Image (tube, rainbow, N blue to C red):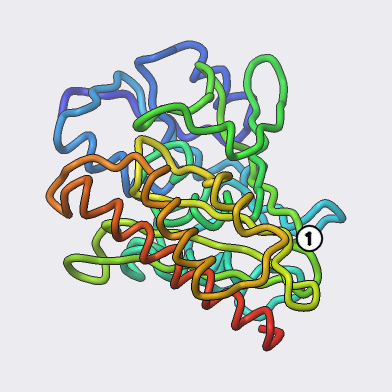
Amino acid sequence: MNEVAWFRPHQLEEALALLEQYGEEARPVAGGSALALLLKQRLVQPRALISLAGLAELRGIRQEPDGLHLGALTTHAEVERLAGTAGVPPLLVETYRRVATRRVRNQATVGGGLAHADPAQDPPAALLALEARVRLVGPRGERIVPLDQFFVDYYETVLQPGELIREVIVPPPPSGSAGAYVKFLSRSVDDYATVAVAVQLGLEGRVLTGVRVAFIAAGPTPRRAREVETLLEGEVPRVGLLQEAGQLASQVVEPLDDSRGSAAYKREMAGVMLERAVRLAVERARSGQ
């Protein structure tokens, strides 16, 4: 590593001032699970690293009328441990539980993962399907951005210079709805997914309602598949419909060739994973899970 200055502010205002002072040559550090790899590979060479560990303002999990508020420094493991807690969507816990290994989940943070914007990370799939929002804070104050407007391109977000993620807000899903997260792994269980999908939906009688579908590892950013949602919304789930939805999913994703598979293969797997996720979510909605 190059010589780098290390700061550990204890007030949010101090952290924001340091980010403004060093500009693009500064990097905030939360859990550091992603940044450590970037530094080791010399993909980033900042002059200043600003630890967020001392910022109480970025910690905490609380229930509010508008949903579950997760402080940016909440670890993946802390979300995992919310299983069975009233007001916590099971889809959220299921997805965070399947991130890499326990060691990573104990270190990686909710806000840090989103800011890193790796399109193959698991959590954005569930957060998009649950229509989460992110609260950002910077030198010009705060703003709230829907997560489906947060990701811009590979490893790029709408975060402006000097801005941090303060918290993630997950609205309560409709009563009686259920979700499912399905991913395909071509290697070990702690590897990135070849392709994965999260689905949240409800049933009114036999008809699908409130359908939300989101993919990761299937394009330059995590993304909602609104075309698939529209196809499924208001329909009775049946084999032919799910097959049609799978075919549509394979057309709307935009994967690239990489070591986990060709783009063509990933398109096919996107359709297969979508069908499985919808079936599982429907079964859970019917059984009240």
Q: Quadrant of the N terminus?
A: top left
* Horizontal side, residue 87 vs residue 120: left or right: right
Q: Is residue 26 above or below residue 89?
A: above
Q: Number of marks in the image?
A: 1
Q: Residue at x 44, y 43 (%)?
A: 222
Q: Where residue 36 sits: x, y (%)?
A: 26, 42
Q: Residue at x 52, y 13 (%)?
A: 20
Q: Residue at x 60, y 69 (%)?
A: 179
Q: Quadrant of residue 150?
A: top right
Observer-nearest residue: 130 or 203? 203
Task: Farthest residue to the bottom: give it.
Answer: 287
Observer-nearest residue: 168 or 124? 124
Element at label 1? strand
Q: Residue at x 62, y 81 (%)?
A: 284
Residue type, label 1: Gln
Q: Where residue 97 sits: x, y (%)?
A: 45, 70
Q: Quadrant of the C terminus?
A: bottom right
| Residue at mark 1 | 63
* Horizontal side, residue 208 vs residue 18: left or right: right
Observer-nearest residue: 218 or 62? 218
Q: Quadrant of residue 107?
A: bottom left
